[in-house]
Amino acid sequence: MSNLIDKLSAILDRSSLFLGEDISEKYHADWSGADPCAPSVLLKPKTTDQLSEIMALCFEYDQPVVIQGGLTGLAGGATPLIGELAISLERMRGIEAIDPSGMTLTALAGTPLQVLQDAADDHDLSLPLDLGARGSCQIGGNVSTNAGGTEVIRYGMTRALVLGLEAVLADGTQINAMNTLVKNNSGYDLKHLFIGSEGTLGIVTRVVLQLQPKARSTHTALCAVADYASVIKLLIELKRSLGPGLTGFELMWDNYYEKVLEVIPALSSPLDGQFPFYLLVEYLDNDQELGSDRFETVLYKQLELGVLQDAVIAKSHQDAEKFWQIRDGIGELFQVLGPVSNQDVSLPVADIGLFATDLERRLKAKYPDVVVLLFGHIGDNNLHICAYTGREEDKTKISHDIMQLIGEYSGAITAEHGVGILKRDYLPLSRSATEIALMKTLKVAMDPKAILNRGRVFE
Ligand SMILES: Cc1cc2nc3c(=O)[nH]c(=O)nc-3n(C[C@H](O)[C@H](O)[C@H](O)COP(=O)(O)OP(=O)(O)OC[C@H]3O[C@@H](n4cnc5c(N)ncnc54)[C@H](O)[C@@H]3O)c2cc1C
């Protein structure tokens, strides 16, 4: 190891290489709750060339490496394992170009998502990727986890926004796939190997993203619904009548909604009365007045038909923010709930209602005092589950039970957070044996010594 450190010191200046006590605890774990562990060395390269040289040396010395972006990941992938050297991308940040005619943005992978959103906004454009961790997560982390978020129903996941990228392989080879073209069928589209593979096949260093024109008006409503069948009816009707303008369809079960209001006293329900389901609906239009009329008319019709029990439309940006604060209240809940099994799963949208009832029934049979809070991006089949008894020893058992039920429903064990370390053992519930075998073949081809994010996604 000391040989390797000497050689690394020749590539990096003293302020980019950290050892022992000088490694801040921040780099011992991501936000997933996976067991913290100090990396053997922490490196903060500033350029792709430096990173290439570092990887060439690690390859030569068979040194396992963990890649760290903004460390907001919820699957434990960026948490070091014993003996791993950590590479943080935080100093590889900055926007290189914004092309207003092609509506593309080129940036270094360590740039925080929010910095990119703001830059797009300054050019009257929009980067349609948004998640609660926007201020801390990095675009390289978003690409590597194929992050989802709240606008997937309209624009797809991160994969759909990436036109090109640059990556460094385990042996230090640089792959320049900085495509800026929407159409390019010239051979394999290699960027997809790095999107969503959670840093197991290469380190993303730069990206080219497709931006969108900024919508002129945003319309937000909080709706009350009596049963899951009505949620589905409403989803179909809103997709039909609002078309691609429908950018948010966020469902909250009553106990999640009520828990958020209980825990955050500054928030109150904009609706009178209590209902089994609450829905946050968002619609974008290019005409404020026409958009407002269209949105109101569609919702009013659903009220008349009895699909909606009640609805309130935000009259201002501040109103809309308050509605979103209820939906995003999960962050505050985590601070007070104690040990929680926090799952992010995917199921056919028609099955989610039944799954939710089944899940609660089965968990209650085993853990009578369990609380199950549910919410999710239902417009794109994504359900978030928080289940807890308050006892640490139940957390892993509950997670295991949820994963098994997902397997029975042929769902996905992770919809957007990724597999990382925490869900690795459950991968066969969602992927066939031949799919996993091909993943391993790719891993061996691209990282023959298994030094990059070893043990993440699969053993
Ligand atoms: C409050 C909160 C809300 C969230 N909401 C959402 C949400 O709505 N949707 C969603 O999908 N996720 C969500 N997440 C999870 C998380 O923010 C995303 O997974 C995000 O994409 C991780 O980015 P990061 O830069 O923090 O990556 P990290 O946590 O640092 O790393 C995540 C994984 O990617 C790898 N990695 C990081 N950077 C690179 C790189 N440049 N090249 C190769 N591999 C790399 C790491 O090794 C690790 O395996 C949320 C998290 C929090 C805390």
Image (cartoon, rainbow, N blue to C red):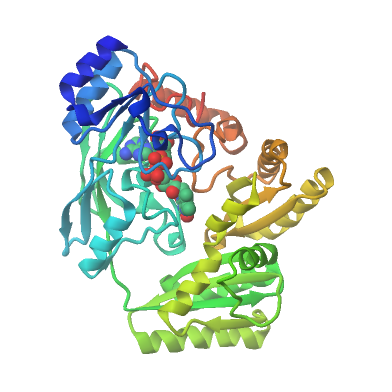
> Which picture quadrant has residue 119?
bottom left
Q: Which residue corresponds to the image point at 41% horizontal and 73% vertical from the top-left?
A: 245
Query: Residue 321, can we see it?
Result: yes
What's the residue at 47%, 27% (across, down)? 37
- Provide residue 233's location: percent of width, then percent of height: 63, 72
Whether residue 296 sits left or right of residue 15 in the image: it is right
Report the image quarter containing ligand 1.
top left
**Considering only vertical position in the picture, is 354 above or below 438?**
below
In terms of depth relative to the viewer, which is nearer, 71 or 173? 71
Front residue of 25/146: it is 25
Q: Of 72 and 408, which appears nearest the observer?
A: 72
Q: Quadrant of residue 195?
A: top left
Quick one: quadrant of the N terminus? Answer: top left
Residue shown at the point (31%, 50%) measured from the top left: 112
Name the residue nearer the viewer: 127 or 118. 118
**Which residue sits at x=37%, y=34%?**
24
